Amino acid sequence: MIGTIRLLVYAGGITRTVKFSVIRAKAPYNAILGTPWLHSMKAVPSTYHQCVKFPGKDGKTQTIRGDQQAARELLIATIKMQQEASLVNSISKPLNKI
């Protein structure tokens, strides 16, 4: 972990300060909003529907939807990177037993 940063997150008319951990790693996410943010927003996440629902300032249910096209492109790129990393670079003759 490189460090942490606190940023304001604005969603559905509600602003919350959220602590993010900064890491040096390739990840399939721009950010991960964890349990503290979900609880403070009274949010309900759905990985199946790729959305988060929470009560807005006006009392109406607000929905934040995932970007399915971006998620699909990222998944394809990640799979390609994993396949390329697992390719055999060279083949040599087996060593004779001594």
Image: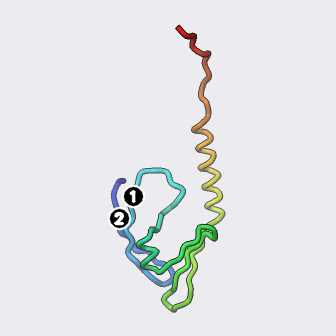
Tag shown at residue 22: 1
Query: What amino acid is labelled 1 in the image?
Result: Val
The answer to whether residue 66 is above or below residue 74 is: below
Q: Are marks 2 and 1 in contact (CB under 8 Å)?
A: yes
Q: CA distance from mark 2 to mark 1?
A: 7 Å
Expressed as whole percent of the image width and height from the top left, the position of residue 40 reads 42, 79
Q: Nearer the viewer, residue 27 or 46?
A: 46
Query: What amino acid is labelled 2 in the image?
Result: Ile
Callout 2: helix, strand or loop? strand
The answer to whether residue 91 is above or below residue 86 is: above
Query: For the view shown, which residue lies furthest in the front direction?
Result: 98
Callout 1: helix, strand or loop? strand
- Residue lying at 59% horizontally and 43% vertically, measured from the top left: 82
- Residue lying at 41% horizontally and 72% vertically, measured from the top left: 36
Question: How many numbered marks have been drawn onto this rendered protein structure?
Answer: 2
Q: Nearer the viewer, residue 89 or 37?
A: 37
The answer to whether residue 41 is above or below residue 67 is: below
Q: Nearer the viewer, residue 97 or 29?
A: 97
- Residue lying at 52% horizontally and 7% vertically, measured from the top left: 98
- Residue topped by disc 2: 5
